Image: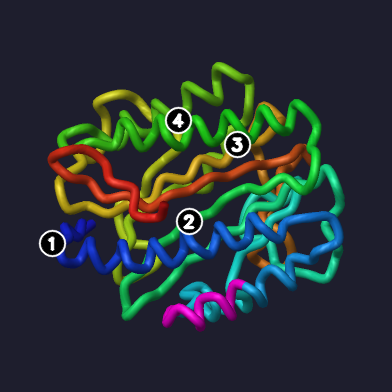
Amino acid sequence: MRIQLRRKEEIGYIREAGRILAACHREIAKIIQPGITTSEIDARVEKFLEKNGAVPEQKGYKGFPYATCASVNDVVCHGFPDQRPLEAGDVVTIDMVVNKNGWLADSGWTYAVAEVSPKVRKLMEHTHEALFRGIEAARHGAALGDVGHAIEQVAKREGYGIVKSLVGHGIGRAIHEPPDVLNYGVPGRGLKLKEGMVITIEPVFTLGSTGAVFWGDDGWTISSADGSIGVQYEHTIAITREGPVILTD
């Protein structure tokens, strides 16, 4: 397993992709409402990226046919955009990888469609909290187990399931580079983080306590096994001597 350590200049290139990605998420937030379809969102994302000199890296990746992953309610990851209008009370996670001049950034975000139930709102808030707990733990000299443990403690505290088969990863020139960044772990265990590493942190929690999932017939769509709602938040970050730096905000 060869870990890429990026120079400041290279991290700057990833940051360029990350800024476009963050701006795209801000545009998505403006249009999420009952009646819009995830296919419409996907088309708008593709146009936005083209306008900004970037491309959706996952389109065509291992045959994936869309610019975004659009996962609604109990679909926790890798959902296909479709023509079903979103309804009030739904949640939808839009996840994308942006390629700007060969450098990649990755971020997924869960959006509420109008008003959601209080327990779903809490799930969103706590998964978002877990993301930032994980980021805070991702420091030069810390272990990957410290990151996973920080995320896991939030899920345990609230009784949520962790989708353990979905993990963060290194990123730069390719979508998935080593190392894997688990959403659970033992403090002090695992690979030591070093200055120059660029990774994604992406907790995926379910309202159901097991976090168990199954894959759909399309080979991509991952849904909670108990039918409970899943939520994901993801940033790409760089490890520096001064602390973690978010590249997708």
Q: Who's the residue at 22% across and 52% down the image? A: 197
Answer with mark 1 or mark 4, whichever residue precedes in sequence: 1
- State yes or no: discs 3 and 1 in contact (Cβ < 8 Å): no
Answer with mark 3 or mark 1, whichever residue precedes in sequence: 1
Q: Nearer the viewer, mark 1 or mark 4?
A: 1
* Disc 1: which residue: 7
User: Percent from the top left, x then y, of residue 137?
Assistant: 31, 31
Answer with mark 2 or mark 3, whichever residue precedes in sequence: 2
* Disc 2: which residue: 107
Tell me the distance, in whole angstroms, between the alpha carbons under discs 4 and 2: 17 Å
* Disc 3: which residue: 205
The local secondary structure at tag 3 comes to strand
User: Percent from the top left, x then y, of residue 87?
Assistant: 86, 52
Assess disc 3: are there few (<14), some (14-19) or many (≥20) residues with their C-alpha within 10 Å of its C-alpha: many
The local secondary structure at tag 1 comes to loop
- State yes or no: discs 4 and 2 in contact (Cβ < 8 Å): no
Q: Which residues are magenta?
A: 45-54
- Check the image and report above or below for 31 versus 75: below
User: Percent from the top left, x then y, of residue 225?
Assistant: 74, 42
The amino acid type found where label 4 is placed reads Ile
The local secondary structure at tag 4 comes to helix
* Disc 4: which residue: 151
- Horizontal relation, residue 43 to residue 155: left or right: right
